[in-house]
């Protein structure tokens, strides 16, 4: 090839090399040739597929429920079923079982189930709810005005907020569920700091000490130091 031909070929290659250098300097990598996959693009696509799922939606991730509620429901249903079975067996053995007597015993067992059916306590950031069979009551724990213990055969803790809401819960539920107690205590501290909680701090502190004792005893039992 003559000198003129080599000069023309070099002149055609120099713009192409210059464009490749410009692309490399601009994007930090060489441009992919025609028909070849871009390695960096493939890596980005793989990273997109491997990205973990996001957090749970707000409003549901912080909700805590009573962990023993399902077991208490099964126990209540079992008691009602045993009562119904006994009544039907006795009535059948006596030869006096009829459809209306069977319906009466079923209604009696259903009434027992309604009496024994436990409440379900749930809590989130700034609120606590108590759900019964047909009604749900909720208080704002960050707007509490009174926390009053109710002594008697069955101990209860009555919570009232500045919006007029009121709930009544069993302190044993809080002892069995430290997460529920943590959310209640967190909201009560906000109310106390804001000056709305004027009555009931002593009851909360007493319950906190009891919960600490229960936790310490559980740790000792697990570790065999009791």
Image (tube, rainbow, N blue to C red):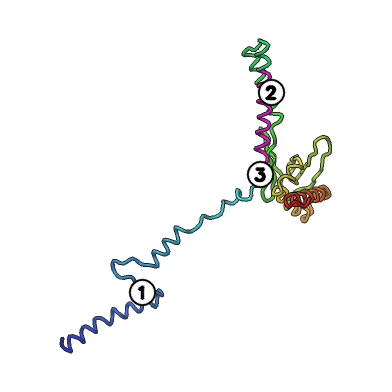
Which residue is denoted by mark 1 in the rendering?
30
Q: Is residue 105 above or below residue 170?
A: above
Check residue 83 in the rendering and tell me which mark sits there, or answer none.
2
Q: Residue at x 78, y 47 (%)?
A: 145
- Looking at the image, the residue that sits furthest to the front is 224
Q: Residue at x 56, y 51 (%)?
A: 57
190 or 100: which is nearer to us? Answer: 100
Q: Which residues are magenta?
A: 68-88
- Looking at the image, the residue that sits furthest to the top is 95
Element assignment for label 1: loop
Q: Residue at x 41, y 61 (%)?
A: 45
Image position, residue 174 (x, y; %) = 74, 45
Q: Is residue 125 above or below residue 91?
A: below
Image position, residue 157 (x, y; %) = 78, 42
Which residue is denoted by mark 3 in the rendering?
65
Image position, residue 183 (x, y; %) = 70, 50
> Is residue 19 covered in magenta?
no
Q: CA distance from mark 1 to mark 2?
A: 81 Å
């Amino acid at each position: 090839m003559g000198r003129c031909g080599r000069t023309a070929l070099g002149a055609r290659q120099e713009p192409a090399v210059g464009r490749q250098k410009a692309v490399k300097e601009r994007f930090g990598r060489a441009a992919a040739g025609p028909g070849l996959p871009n390695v960096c693009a493939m890596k980005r696509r793989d990273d997109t597929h491997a990205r973990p799922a996001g957090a749970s939606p707000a409003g549901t991730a912080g909700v805590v429920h009573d962990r023993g509620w399902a077991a208490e429901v099964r126990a209540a249903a079992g008691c009602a079923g045993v009562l119904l079975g006994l009544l039907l067996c006795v009535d059948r053995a006596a030869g006096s079982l009829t459809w209306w007597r069977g319906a009466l015993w079923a209604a009696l067992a259903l009434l027992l189930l309604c009496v024994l059916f436990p409440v379900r306590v749930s809590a989130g950031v700034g609120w606590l709810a108590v759900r019964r069979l047909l009604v749900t009551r909720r208080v704002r724990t960050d707007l509490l005005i009174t926390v009053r213990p109710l002594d008697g055969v069955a101990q209860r803790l009555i919570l009232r907020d500045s919006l007029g809401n009121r709930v009544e819960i069993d302190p044993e539920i809080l002892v069995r569920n430290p997460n529920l107690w943590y959310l209640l205590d967190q909201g009560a501290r906000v109310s106390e700091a804001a000056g709305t909680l004027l009555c009931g701090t002593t009851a909360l502190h007493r319950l906190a000490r009891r919960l600490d004792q229960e936790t310490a005893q559980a740790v000792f039992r697990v570790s065999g130091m009791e």
